[in-house]
Image (tube, rainbow, N blue to C red):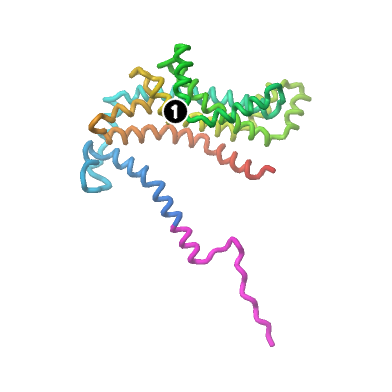
Amino acid sequence: MSDVAAPPVKGRGTRGPGGSIALHGALIVASLVAVFPVAWLILTSLKPRDAWQSSTVTLFDSPTLANYVQVLGETGFPRWLANSLIVAALTTVIGVVMSASTGYAVSRMRFPGFRSVMWMLLITQMFPVAILIVPIYNLLAGLGLINQFPGLVIAYLTSTVPFCAWMMKGYFDTIPTEIDEAGRVDGLTHFGTFWRLILPLSKPGLAVAGFYSFITAWAEVAYATAFMTGDDKYTLAVGLGQFVGQHKAEWGLLTASSVLIAVPAAVVFLLVQRHLVTGLTAGATKS
């Protein structure tokens, strides 16, 4: 009697034709859901001024760049853009420096008040922006920083530095302490070890901290609305409110401005993308 070969047993990672079709179908639907708002925003920005009010849904209705021309040439958008770039750049640079140095200190050193600092970094992230606006406003008013870029930068740092410092502390914990010891043997100070040995190994963590700080300052609305009162000091988040009237919103101008606002954020993401991917890979493989 001949032996009958047993049917092959499917592994846990294998899928049948039905499973593959369902998986790819779900991925396609999810991709369409994610892309649809962006595509609709771009298409609306290219329509004539009042075309969005039409009851007929069309993808291209006499596409024109009139909205972009009006936004760039007849509104305060260029000034708002410059203000936002200044605030976001200052927040990013100062935030990365403070969070990296703080994260390294709490990762490598044990000093009086260490636990208090760790609790402070954690607890400050628990308060919503709505609760913090009034006390921060009073502090900035006492310092004469209302309607000043430094005041807005300080307000943003109160939310970016605690999160980024906590994150950088976790990243520095993955770097072997033997590197610090080798630096000290070579005669480097704590700062020299941090600057010359640790920071070059921390580019993925710095990229995440910088990207988070930039996006926080670039897209924030509440602080900018409360602290910036002059037309010449408006950031993009506040300036876009000028396109919304009591009875009508200029959707053509709003969508065109939204597309333009997304460009700097996309550029920053592309610049740090390689380090972001490297950071995710390193975090997944380190023991």
Q: Which residue is drawn at 49% across and 62% down?
A: 20
Q: How many labels does the image show?
A: 1
Q: Where is residue 17 in the image (x, y as percent from the top left)?
A: 49, 66
Magenta stretch secondary structure, dominant: loop
Who is closer to the viewer here, 215 or 122? 122
Q: Tell me which corner region of the image, top left, top right, bottom left or bottom right, holds residue 284.
A: top right
Tell whether position 32 is magenta: no
Q: Where is residue 146 in the image (x, y as percent from the top left)?
A: 42, 16
| Lateral position of residue 57 relative to residue 87, left or right | left
Q: Residues within 10 Å of mark 1 (few under 14, many from 20)?
A: few
- Give the residue displayed 57% in from the left and 29% down from the top: 123
Q: In which quarter of the image is the N terminus?
A: bottom right
The quadrant in which the C terminus is found is top right
Magenta span contains residue 20: yes
Q: Residue 137: name its quadrant.
A: top left
- Residue drawn at (40%, 28%), measured in percent from left and top? 221
259 or 150, nearer to the observer: 150
Q: Give the range drawn in magenta.
A: 1-25
Relative placement, left or right, of 31 versus 69 is right
Taking the view exactly as shown, the residue that stands out farthest to the bottom is 1
Q: For residue 266, what is the image quadrant?
A: top left
Identified by mark 1, the residue type is Ala
Q: Which residue is drawn at 73% across and 32% down?
A: 177
Judged from the image, the secondary structure of the residue bearing numbered disc 1 is: helix
In this figure, which residue is indicated by the disc labeled 1?
130
Q: Is residue 239 left or right of residue 22?
A: left
202 or 128: nearer the viewer: 128
Question: 186 or 216: nearer the eye?
Answer: 216
Q: Where is residue 135 in the image (x, y as percent from the top left)?
A: 48, 20
Q: Is residue 130 left or right of residue 230?
A: right
Find residue 126 and report its horizontal and vertical position in percent. 53, 31
